[in-house]
């Protein structure tokens, strides 16, 4: 029975309603059918085949078995899918993947979307493989081709609604848009995964919000950022979906600017991010502005994007060292800073009869923070969200001293003030002195000097520097301007404060330099348990960044509280368990095991329920950390320690399973035997 002017209730590819709208291709006409393999060598939903007399290679994308006659699907959704597909098959543009029609395998009952084969993978894969060789002419061409495709599609009355680097394919180096709204119709509800950064925030706030062409413009703006930077947006949030969602809904956007990026390009993609959809440019306007952007030859080379730039009027300066990019926290951004420093009156600093530096002035930094950030380099391994698996960074002392000795900073002890030219304010930029570009938020001239010094000062100078700042009246409680991180959080990132740890050593590193700074801060009234915007204490920060037991022990011995939960209910103990859920590295696991023992011995409560976004069983939270330890197969000494520290072994899961039953269900035979043999502990 057919509905009036609509899709039949029993819709298949044989129905006239579908045949009259979409090109139906006989599955038997395909030859050399070959399933593509995913990264894990598992057959994907994509099949390659040869078609027609010319044996043209086409791509068959699996929809679902019996897609058009599935009672679970809303008929309106399927009808909309058919109508959209009818429009898409009529599209013909160089920068849009051609959709040829539909076919159905009568044996497997699979329905396929037949498309032109594209040989170069996705835009994201292309950037990962080729970014270092791309010039700005190449990047401009990439965005221009995407813009042309989107402009054509919008002119045809179609909105994509799912534009992201995985849905932009590369064919012989040229961009082609694919996977239009059909992906939404196919899935019913858009899956919120790593592509959440490309979804219009209004849709994230209200799933009933109707996305349209303006939503595509927002997505294109984020794509433009990734093309310019070579890395995904909000990369360091890793797999923390809730953190990423909170950032986006709070209005945070990527603000780092890769040096060499034309300012018109930056302004354009930021306009695409406008909260008000009506203020976003159209695809035609974007294309027009992209075409008009002039590329300066000196900034073509992507490999130059992290060099210090010296002004032509300062020939006396030595060639600058290279500074690598580093994204330190969520609110990363780029800024350009210049330094104008007075060399007329050098001074020396001593404390307790010891000379810390022959010229501390050169090591204190320009304006002790307002400009220091522009002088400090660091390394980045953007591939690991934890930032802990990368090789140990070189000490920042060397680059710190090299850079600051270029323009020694002068402290006048009589007036206890920093000398600045009378016609220049401390925060003003002098374009004729010294320029530095960096992608870190901590290079921003607005960052408090306390935060900068804690993060970048050499270990042997940091306490004298802090003492000097204190005498100058600096507020030691100042916070990072983006995420309100404290000086304690910043210390965790100063590699020069930490001893080198050896994997086979049974003795934990002492990290005496780190300990001495912690004690100094506490003695000056600072709270070691102060939290940032996300509710993280320095313990959270150290576990995430360092994963080194000696650092955690130093904090715990200075009375850091192990039971403070962040804004999502995650305590440091929960954090360790969540790390073990994700990591497969034996050395990292061993360190986390040791940290868990340190936390438990310092009073961490194993009975606090884990947040529902960490360890769950069938979507439900585990009763306490003891159940999590059994589920993860942690060493028996940790399970025993949890019980001795008061973990409730009589709790049950949401299915009513006691601990012994739970150990049996998750096949942890070692824990099951141990618990059965030691019922007296329970």
Image (spheres, grey):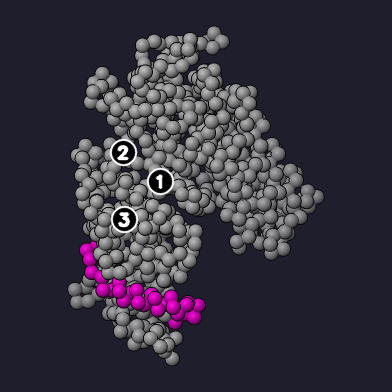
Q: Nearer the viewer, residue 569 or 599?
A: 569
**Residue at position x 40%, y 46% from top?**
254
Looking at the image, residue 427 lies above or below residue 276:
above
Residue 91 x, y percent position in the rendering = 26, 70
Answer yes or no: is residue 503 visible. Answer: no
Answer yes or no: is residue 207 visible. Answer: yes
| Discs 1, 2 touching: Cβ within 8 Å | no
- The residue that mark 3 highlights is 281
Give how far apart the Cα atoms at labels 2 and 3 are. 24 Å
Give how far apart the Cα atoms at labels 1 and 2 are. 14 Å
Q: Which residues are magenta?
A: 69-95
Instruction: Find residue 254 and name its label.
Output: 1
Looking at the image, residue 291 lies above or below residue 81:
above
First along the sequence among labels 2 and 3: 2
Residue 190 x, y percent position in the rendering = 45, 64
- Quadrant (top left/top right/bottom left/bottom right) for the N terminus: bottom left
Residue 602 x, y percent position in the rendering = 69, 36
Disc 1: CA contacts within 10 A as few (<14), some (14-19) or many (>=20): many
Q: Farthest residue in the bottom direction?
A: 1
First along the sequence among labels 1 and 2: 1
Looking at the image, residue 55 lies above or below residue 219:
below
Residue 55 x, y percent position in the rendering = 22, 73
Query: Residue 62 occupies which quadrant of the picture?
Result: bottom left
- The residue that mark 2 highlights is 259
């Amino acid at each position: 029975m057919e509905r009036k002017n609509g899709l039949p209730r029993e819709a298949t590819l044989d129905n006239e309603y579908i045949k009259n709208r979409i090109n139906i291709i006989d599955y038997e006409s395909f030859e050399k059918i070959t399933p593509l393999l995913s990264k894990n060598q598992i057959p994907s939903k994509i099949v390659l085949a040869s078609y027609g007399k010319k044996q043209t290679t086409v791509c068959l994308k699996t929809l679902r078995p019996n897609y058009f006659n599935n009672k679970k699907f809303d008929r309106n959704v399927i009808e909309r899918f058919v109508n959209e597909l009818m429009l898409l098959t009529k599209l013909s543009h160089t920068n849009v993947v051609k959709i040829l029609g539909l076919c159905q395998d009568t044996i497997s009952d699979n329905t396929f979307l037949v498309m032109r084969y594209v040989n170069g993978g996705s835009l994201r894969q292309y950037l990962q493989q080729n970014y270092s060789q791309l010039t700005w002419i190449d990047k401009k061409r990439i965005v221009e081709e995407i813009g042309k495709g989107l402009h054509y599609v919008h002119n045809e009355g179609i909105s994509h609604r799912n534009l992201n680097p995985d849905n932009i394919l590369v064919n012989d180096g040229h961009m082609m848009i694919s996977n239009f709204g059909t992906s939404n119709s196919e899935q019913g509800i858009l899956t919120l995964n790593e592509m959440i950064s490309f979804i219009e925030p209004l849709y994230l706030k209200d799933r009933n919000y109707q996305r349209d062409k303006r939503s595509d413009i927002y997505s294109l703006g984020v794509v433009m950022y990734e093309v310019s930077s070579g890395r995904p947006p909000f990369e360091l949030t890793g797999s923390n979906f809730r953190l990423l969602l909170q950032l986006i809904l709070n209005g945070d956007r990527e603000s780092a600017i890769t040096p060499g990026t034309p300012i018109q390009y930056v302004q354009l993609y930021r306009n695409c991010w406008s909260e008000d959809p009506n203020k976003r440019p159209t695809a035609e306007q974007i294309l027009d502005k992209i075409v008009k952007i002039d590329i300066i030859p000196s900034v073509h080379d992507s490999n130059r994007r992290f060099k210090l730039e010296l002004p032509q009027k300062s020939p006396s300066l030595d060639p600058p060292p290279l500074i690598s990019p580093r994204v330190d926290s969520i609110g990363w951004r780029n800024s350009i800073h210049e330094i104008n420093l007075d060399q007329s009156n050098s001074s020396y600093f001593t404390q307790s009869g010891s000379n810390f530096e022959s010229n501390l002035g050169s090591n204190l930094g320009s304006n002790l923070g307002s400009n220091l950030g522009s002088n400090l380099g660091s390394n980045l391994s953007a591939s690991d969200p934890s930032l802990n698996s990368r090789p140990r960074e070189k000490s920042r002392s060397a680059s710190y001293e090299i850079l600051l000795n270029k323009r020694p900073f002068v402290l006048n002890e009589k007036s206890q003030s920093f000398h600045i030219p009378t016609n220049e304010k401390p925060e003003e930029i002098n374009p004729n002195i010294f320029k530095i570009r960096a992608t870190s938020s901590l290079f921003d001239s607005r960052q408090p000097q306390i935060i900068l010094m804690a993060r970048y000062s050499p270990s042997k100078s940091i306490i004298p520097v802090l003492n000097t700042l204190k005498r100058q009246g600096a507020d030691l409680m100042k916070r990072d301007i983006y995420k309100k991180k404290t000086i304690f959080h910043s210390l965790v990132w100063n590699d020069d404060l930490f001893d080198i740890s050896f994997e086979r050593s049974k003795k934990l590193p002492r990290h005496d330099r780190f300990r001495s700074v912690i004690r100094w801060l506490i003695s000056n009234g600072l709270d070691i348990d102060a939290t940032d915007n996300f509710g993280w204490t320095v313990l959270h920060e150290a576990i995430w960044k360092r994963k080194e037991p000696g650092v955690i022990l130093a904090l715990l011995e200075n009375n850091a509280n192990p039971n403070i939960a962040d804004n999502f209910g995650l305590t440091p103990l929960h954090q360790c368990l969540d790390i073990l859920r994700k990591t497969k590295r034996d050395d990292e696991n061993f360190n986390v095991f040791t940290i868990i023992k340190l936390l438990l011995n310092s009073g961490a409560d194993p009975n606090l329920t884990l947040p529902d976004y960490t360890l769950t069983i069938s979507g439900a939270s585990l009763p306490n950390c003891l159940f999590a330890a059994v589920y993860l197969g942690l060493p028996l000494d940790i399970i025993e320690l949890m019980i001795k520290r008061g973990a409730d072994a009589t709790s049950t899961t949401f299915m009513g399973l006691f601990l012994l039953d739970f150990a049996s269900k998750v096949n942890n035979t070692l824990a099951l035997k141990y618990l059965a043999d030691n019922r007296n502990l329970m």
